Every structure is written in C-alpha cells, then in structure tokens.
Image: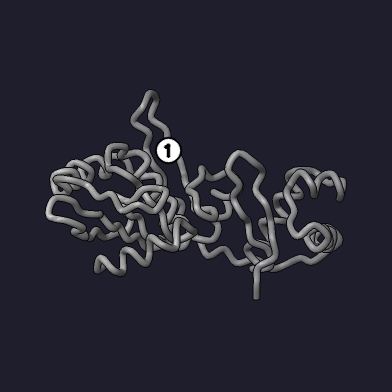
Amino acid sequence: MTFKELQNRVSNGENLFTEFKHKINFPEKIAAEIVAFANTKGGLLLIGVDDNKVISGIKNIEEEIYELDKLLLKLIKNSIDYSKEIIPISDKKSVLAVRIKESVVKPNSVVSLTGQKTEIVYVRSADRSVQASNLVIKIMQLQSQNTQVRLKFGDIEKNIMQIVENQGFTTIKSIINLSHISEKTAQESCINLVLSGILKIVPEEGKEDKFIVVEQ
C-alpha cells in the first residue's frame, strides 16, 4: 500500500472493513480487532492512525511488531489468516497495515490474560468490534459446519417476517412478546431463517441482537 492509498483509505473513516488504532501497546485490543474481522467479512486494521483520521505513525515499528507477534500467538485461540505491511510515513515513523481474511471455520476467539483465563468471541458490527452473544456464536458454528436446513415456513415464521416488515427489524424479545412463544422456539425459528438466507443477525453492543431481512 502506498502512502497515497493509505490516505485515501483513512479519509473514508472506520467502517465494517476498516479499523484505526493509535498504538500497539494494548495487544488484547489488537487481537480482538483481528478476531472480529476474521469472524465477519475480513478487513484492514491500521495501527498508527488516530480515530480522528490523523496518520500519526509509530516509531521503532519493527521492534513493536516482534513483541506483538509473540503475544498474538498466546492471545488468538485459532489460526487466523492475516498479513502485515509496514507503510513509511516519514524517516522515523510508519503505519502498520494488518489485512485479515474471513475465516472459513468460525468462531475465532481471544484468550484473556487478565485474571481467570476465558475465551471471548468478537465480531464486526458497523464500525466497531463487539463481543458476540451466545446466539451469534451458535449461528457461526452452524454456518461453519455447513448445516443444511429445510425451511419450515409456518405460522411462527410468518409472524416473525411480519414483525420485521412492520419494524424494519426484530429481536428475540420482540418476537416473544408479539407472537407469545417461548424464547427457545423464537431462537430456533430465527436461526432457521438465518441459515436459510432469509434473515441476517446484526450484533448490537450492549443491546439485544437484531434480525433484518437479507438484501437480495
């Protein structure tokens, strides 16, 4: 990537496929971004770029990358396909571009090194990387297994699609309240509609996941 190409990418801001990070000094956050892209559609992580689109760069970048690589081996649970490129912006500073490919097998997770070891799954939602809900994780697992479903389009599914049409989206709680069915039934029906390619689940940070119609 040339400096001009970097400037053009940065000028478009952060989005589903692009994330900026000022420094490398928080390896768990870097790992979370890489995992989120791999669990979604892939993307580009630019380290040395501020949130306000200022290309600040990093000094001694090769030394920092060496330390980062060692930590990422500990932090990222599965093998993720990503590559790194150093983009000089001055005699002393550079930007690190990390290109991440979408994983075939999901979900990928980050191992937390603080306190009790736990594995956390992240996904990309709009311009942010968010922790995945259990429902999102289950859908990713089923999609990775190429689970074949035979769509049963009964009254429950018709009600769900009607709710989506009326509101533009729906949630599990909304379906339960409006259709008067159990949480388990609502989840199973939504999973079926997602695996059938009719609905798409949209992760929401700090909120309930949304279901929207897949654009044709």
Q: Residue at x 79, y 47 (%)?
A: 174
Q: Is residue 105 left or right of residue 66?
A: right
Front residue of 91/98: it is: 91
Q: Which residue lies under the disc numbered 1? A: 119
Q: Position of residue 199 (x, y in %)?
A: 68, 63
Q: Give the residue at the far bottom of this rendering.
A: 216
Q: Is residue 134 above or below residue 14?
A: above
Please identify the quadrant where the C terminus is shown: bottom right
Q: Is residue 149 left or right of residue 143?
A: right
Q: Is residue 194 left or right of residue 28?
A: right
Colour scheme employed for the rendering of this structure: one colour
Q: Residue at x 81, y 45 (%)?
A: 176
Question: Which amino acid lies under the numbered mark 1 shown in the image of this protein?
Answer: Glu
Front residue of 170/55: it is: 55
Q: Give the residue at the far top of this rendering.
A: 115
Q: Residue at x 25, y 50 (%)?
A: 57
Front residue of 30/199: it is: 30
Q: Position of residue 86 (x, y in %)?
A: 20, 58
Q: Is residue 6 above or below residue 182?
A: below
Q: Is residue 105 above or below residue 174?
A: below
Please identify the quadrant where the N terminus is shown: bottom left
Label 1 residue SS:
strand
